[in-house]
Amino acid sequence: MSDSVQIVTGAALVGAIIYLGKKVVENWLDKQVKSQLQAEINIYSRELEQLKGSILKDIENSKGKINLHADRQTRLHQLEFETLPRLWELLCKSVILSNQADLAFEEHPDLSTMPDDHVQDFAASQGLSKRAIEAIVSSKNRNDLYIKSMNNLKHYRASVAIWKLRTFNFRNSIIWPPEISLEIDSILSDLTMFLILSRMRDRPSDQNFKQYMALNQGFSGFDAQRLKTVKGLIKDRLNFRLIESANSTGNDTYPK
């Protein structure tokens, strides 16, 4: 009987020891797993924070680049709105003065019958230089010399206007599309040739006369055909009806 009790007691002790050992091992393993898991969570959290910081930095950098690009675009458009109307104004002034230079005759009073002081006042009112006025006053053929002097002055004014247009186009062509600058350069070449041929009318040739007449037709009139292409390019670029129908003088050469 006592042997059976001892056996049972021993088995119970062994079972208790095994159970307790199992629990200890399970608890230890559980703590180890939780500790390792927490360590990995901490690592991932730090990496996540670093990633968030990097993403936020990239976002701020991207915002800065976008804002910078938008600012540049805004300033570029502003420059276009400032320079393109000025380009059109200079172009039309060049055409107007070239057409005026092409007029070989203009009405004027008979200078041969005028007193010297009246001739001086009239010539000065036309913009002639002091030297040219003195030459006219002392000339025996005042009318012819006056016409010649005025033709020289008109050609000079047209040449200056063309030079200003050429300089403005060269200096600002980086702002607007290249097709505008190329068209302006082409018009400038035609205007220059137009002035040269108008000077050569006294010694015409068939080829020169045909070229002169073609240029004359292209640049004359209230709506010069030669300017239509660049006029359309400027209007399209500005996306605004800047250049419209003729004004009260019947001249639509200046933007409204």
Image (spheres, grey):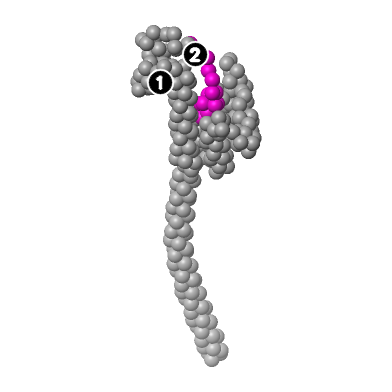
| 84 to 14, vertically: above or below | above
Please report the bounds of the magenta region as a residue range: 94-109
Closer to the camera in the image, 16 or 200 = 200
What amino acid type should be assigned to the residue bearing mark 1?
A: Leu
Magenta run includes residue 100: yes
Bin the neighbour count of mark 2 within 10 Å (Cα to Cα): few under 14, some 14-19, many 20 and up. few
Quarter of the image holding residue 239? Answer: top right
Q: Is residue 79 visible?
A: no
At 56% across and 30% down in the image, what residue appears?
201
Q: Position of residue 225 (x, y in %)?
A: 64, 30
Label 2 – label 1 distance at C-alpha: 14 Å
Q: Is 247 left or right of 155, judged from the image as shown?
A: right
Residue 108 badge: 2
Q: In the image, what residue type sits under mark 2?
A: His
Secondary element type, mark 1: loop
- Magenta span includes 204: no
Q: Where residue 174 sits in the image (x, y, percent)?
A: 48, 43
Of residue 52 and residue 15, the one placed in the foreground of this image is 52
Of residues 92 and 32, the one drawn nearer to the viewer in this rendering: 92
Residue at the image point whose x is 43% and y is 58% from the top: 50
Crowding around mark 1 (Cα neighbors within 10 Å: few <14, some 14 to 19, many 20+) is some
Asked if residue 155 can be seen in this view, the reply is yes
Residue 43, disc = none
